[in-house]
Amino acid sequence: MQPPPGITQLLVKWGSGDQAALGELMPLIYDELRRLASSYLRDEHRHLSLQSTALVHEAYLRLVDQQTVTAQNRAQFFSLAATVMRHVLVDHARRHLAAKHDDSAYKLSLSQADRFSSQPEVDLVLLDDALTDLARIEPQHSRIVELRYFGGLSVTETAEVLGVSVTTVERGWRFARTWLRQELSR
């Protein structure tokens, strides 16, 4: 009897166009995605309506719709998942703010990664706007923040995904934190 395929094998199959491989992959990584989603949403304000399970499910639906997937290993998959979760969170925040028609901010805890702000929480829409601005001037630094903060990847995993050295990631992380701290304090 052949052992069940592992995460890397399923990612390769999914990357080759086998949509059924994603169905096999999800049970293997679901708990980790849920833990990651929970860490984003842990210390939210009372007006938050998105739960971690809903975040994971929405991210899953968006991942299923991906036509081309280039994730070949765990770190690359969580990079993709981080990007998708970021978009889900920002879309939810924008819809929530539009529905409220008020000035209340959608806050996201910064407890999982080094802080970019003197505040314990940051407005997710402002963070997304700042990351978009950062991507225009330093795309790699913006990607480092996305992978570290939204993807929960370590410095080593981030270096692996980006194909750069650990030192490059550390330097980019320091720059991005400083830049974001200035942008978010305005």
Image: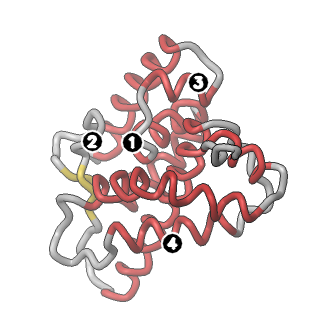
Q: Amino acid at mark 2?
A: Gln
Q: Residue at x 39, y 42 (%)?
A: 149
Q: Residue at x 42, y 68 (%)?
A: 55
Whether pointer 2 and pointer 3 mark residues with C-beta atoms closer than 8 Å, the reply is no
Is 147 drawn above or below residue 89 in the view shown? above
Position of 28 with respect to 36 (left or right) is right
* Residue behind mark 3: 160
Q: Amino acid at mark 4?
A: Glu
Alpha-carbon neighbours of circle 3 within 10 Å: few (<14), some, or many (≥20)? some
**What SS does tag 2 mark?**
loop
Question: Which of the marked residues, 1 or 4, is nearer the chain's N terminus?
Answer: 4
Position of 16 with respect to 77 (left or right) is right
* Residue behind mark 2: 112
Question: Which of the marked residues, 3 or 4, is nearer the chain's N terminus?
Answer: 4
Question: Which of the marked residues, 2 or 1, is nearer the chain's N terminus?
Answer: 2
Q: Amino acid at mark 1?
A: Tyr
Alpha-carbon neighbours of circle 2 within 10 Å: few (<14), some, or many (≥20)? few
- Mark 2 and mark 3: span between their CA atoms? 20 Å
Question: Which of the marked residues, 4 or 2, is nearer the chain's N terminus?
Answer: 4
Corner quadrant of residue 75: top right
Whether pointer 3 and pointer 4 mark residues with C-beta atoms closer than 8 Å, the reply is no
**What SS does tag 1 mark?**
helix
Q: Which mark is residue 149?
A: 1
- Mark 3 and mark 4: span between their CA atoms? 27 Å
- Mark 1 and mark 4: span between their CA atoms? 19 Å
* Residue behind mark 4: 58
Q: Amino acid at mark 3?
A: Glu
